[in-house]
Image (cartoon, rainbow, N blue to C red):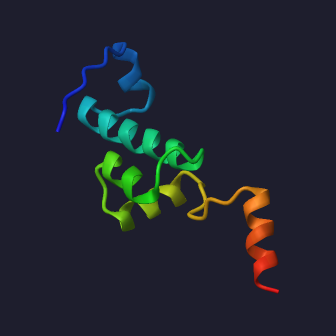
């Protein structure tokens, strides 16, 4: 595993009312959820980056109100058309 150092203002931790280690964990999850949401990562890779199991990542998606299913309008129309 690689370590990355990020400089953050002290006020960042207070903003979310989290200790630095909790803040970092939440930041990893939030980044992975967003990258999954915009289609940059698969669910499995996003879970790995978040440091969560796949089931835990799915719960995180729910917490962030992100759908487990990642279809754009065109993909959804194609999927539905294929069922007829």
Establish if 74 lies above or below 24. Answer: below
Q: Is residue 64 rendered to the left or right of residue 7?
A: right
Q: Position of residue 20 (x, y in %)?
A: 27, 29
Q: Is residue 4 rendered to the left or right of residue 11?
A: left
Quadrant showing the N terminus: top left
Name the residue: 75% across, 66% down: 76
Q: Position of residue 37 (x, y in %)?
A: 57, 49
Q: Is residue 66 rendered to the left or right of residue 58?
A: right
Q: Position of residue 18 (x, y in %)?
A: 34, 34
Give the number of marks: 0
Establish if 22 lies above or below 71. Answer: above
Residue 25 figure quarter? top left
Name the residue: 36% across, 64% down: 54
Furthest-bottom residue in this view: 84
Name the residue: 52% across, 44% down: 40
Residue 32 figure quarter? top left
| Residue nearest the observer in this picture, 21 or 11 | 21
Name the residue: 37% across, 13% down: 9
Q: Position of residue 19 (x, y in %)?
A: 27, 32
| Residue nearest the observer in this picture, 78 or 41 | 78
Quadrant showing the C terminus: bottom right
């Amino acid at each position: 595993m690689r370590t990355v150092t990020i400089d953050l203002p002290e006020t960042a931790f207070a903003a979310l009312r989290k200790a630095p280690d909790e803040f970092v964990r939440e930041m990893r999850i939030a980044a992975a959820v967003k990258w999954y949401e915009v289609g940059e990562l698969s669910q499995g890779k996003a879970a790995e980056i978040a440091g969560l199991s796949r089931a835990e990542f799915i719960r995180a998606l729910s917490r962030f109100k992100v759908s487990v299913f990642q279809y754009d309008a065109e993909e959804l129309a194609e999927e539905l058309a294929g069922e007829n």
